Amino acid sequence: MGTKLTKKLTYDATAEQVAAMLDDVAFREEVLARQKVARGSASIDGDHVTIEQVRSSDGLPSFAQKFVGDEIVIVQKETWTSPTSADVHLAIPGKPGEAAGTLTLTEAGGTTTEVVQLDVSVRIPLVGGKVEGLIKDMVGTALDIEHRVGQEWLAR
């Protein structure tokens, strides 16, 4: 079934400027630093973006810590299918959880809205839905931080 996540992030910039920001490794690395990941890296190869991050599981409920261990590894891959849209896949290597969906940029009057839509799924009997909710919240918070960094980045 899965848990849906939809985030709308608005920038006072053109779609071209937002796309250029998202295509900048320095921006992606600044986002990782601001998200306070334990370790992280970003790479861009043409239309393919890969972001690897390791987060501490401190603060997660005990049932979730049993699932992920001391750290959570998340690998985000974006495949840009046009200048304003990408397929997005988040994997948790070695764990039965993932998120997949799309990212789209829509410009109107010099303002661009980035819409991220993901379907989070965790295939664990009994607690899968709870873990999906935790992942949804974690990704949502990460996107909020990315949005703040992006607004600052574009204002420079």
Image (cartoon, rainbow, N blue to C red):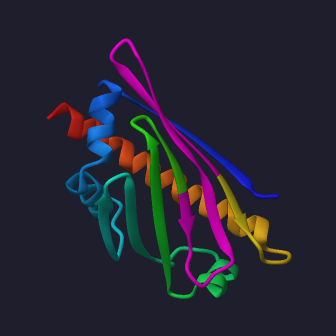
At a point 30% along the width and 64% down the height, the residue shown is 43
Q: Residue 65 in the image: state x and y as whole percent.
A: 61, 83
Residue pictured at 65% horizontal, 78% vertical? 64
Q: Residue at x 30, y 30 (%)?
A: 16
- Residue at image location 73% in from the left, 54% down from the top: 3
Judging depth in this view, the residue of 60 and 69 nearest the camera is 69
Q: Which residues are magenta?
A: 89-118
Q: Principal SS element in the magenta part?
A: strand
Asked which quadrant contains residue 93, the reply is bottom right
x and y percentages locating residue 14 in the rendered image: 31, 24
In this rendering, the answer to whether 61 lies above or below 79 is below
Residue 82: in magenta span? no
Q: In this rendering, is residue 40 above or below 47?
A: below
Residue 101 is inside the magenta segment: yes
Q: Is residue 15 left or right of residue 113?
A: left
Point out the residue furthest to the top here: 109
